[in-house]
Image (tube, rainbow, N blue to C red):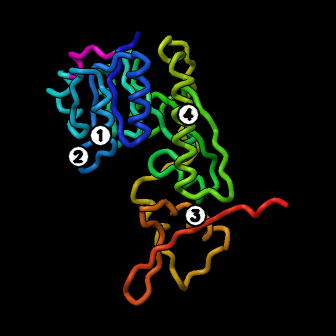
Amino acid sequence: MKRIFYMGNNRLGWEVCRWLVESGEPIVGAALHPPQRRKYGEEITGCLPPGAPVFPADRLHEPEIMEEISALGADLGVSVLFGYILRKPFLEIFPHGCINLHPALLPYNRGSYPNVWSIVEGTPAGSTIHFIDAGIDTGDIVAQREVAVEPVDTGETLYGKLERASLELFRDTWPLIKAGETTARPQSPDSGTSHRLKDIGKIDEIKLEKSYRARDLINILRARTYPPYKGAYFEEGGRKVYLRLQLEYEEEE
């Protein structure tokens, strides 16, 4: 049985944590985002085993924090939607490494907003479990599951699909990870796509005097439709006007 140090955020981070605890897996400690960046933090801390310490995610590379985490004796690090880069000294704490659950079909859509870029760029969508290395979502791939992107999908609906597929993939793959029976394969450093948080700003503003292909404009608008987030917009009279797209299939006769 592998002792786990858990790092998670958002609903998926909570669901994976809860499943591990309900399955009897020993989580010996955890790291959470600072309060201003934290989502589902109360739910995650509420399902942790009694006495499991929680560390601040933005301080994991401080020597005294690493010493405290090392003393917990965790065998494996598990990361789910964790928004901090984990570097070599920290990763070396865990004898069996550190795995990450990323809602993208790597090597496509490394980094931020994979649900958006699969729609905007037409890249494959899915979920991946991979080992964490020095890069961002560049480590060896343990398991994957592809998710279909439909013409009626928005950023919101595709994210929901990716979230569900990611939880299922983790549940199905965990017995192999736990038993040490996985076979990881390397990613090609020259393949796939990567995006940073700030890249989303490059597509959000719709220029009223600019020419767009209809497909490209529709894809931007639907990719950025995820209420209550504001998404894409145009400016008129000095004010931003935000756009959301509603899509549905025609009824079959």
Q: With 209 as the anchor, is 112 left or right in this view? A: left
> Magenta region, mostly helix, strand or loop?
loop
Q: Nearer the viewer, mark 4 or mark 2?
A: 2
Q: CA distance from mark 3 to mark 4?
A: 30 Å
Which portion, as a residue range, is magenta? 69-74
- Give the number of the disc on residue 187: 4
Identify which residue, 66 or 232, lies in the foreground: 232
Residue wearing tag 3: 222
Type of amino acid at the residue the image marks with label 2:
Pro
Q: Residues within 10 Å of mark 3 (few under 14, many from 20)?
A: many
Where residue 213 appears, x then y in whole percent? 66, 73
Residues marked 2 and 1 touching at CB (< 8 Å): yes
Type of amino acid at the residue the image marks with label 1:
Gly
Secondary structure at badge 2 equals helix
First reached walking from the N terminus: tag 1 or tag 4: 1
Where residue 47 appears, x then y in whole percent? 32, 28
**Residue for point 18% across, 22% down:** 68
Quadrant holding the C terminus: bottom right
First reached walking from the N terminus: tag 3 or tag 2: 2
Identify which residue, 147 or 112, lies in the foreground: 147
Q: Residues within 10 Å of mark 1 (few under 14, many from 20)?
A: some
Identify which residue, 48 or 98, lies in the foreground: 48
Quadrant holding the N terminus: top left
Q: Is residue 62 above or below residue 2?
A: below
Q: CA distance from mark 3 to mark 2?
A: 30 Å
Identify which residue, 56 or 27, lies in the foreground: 27
Residue wearing tag 1: 41
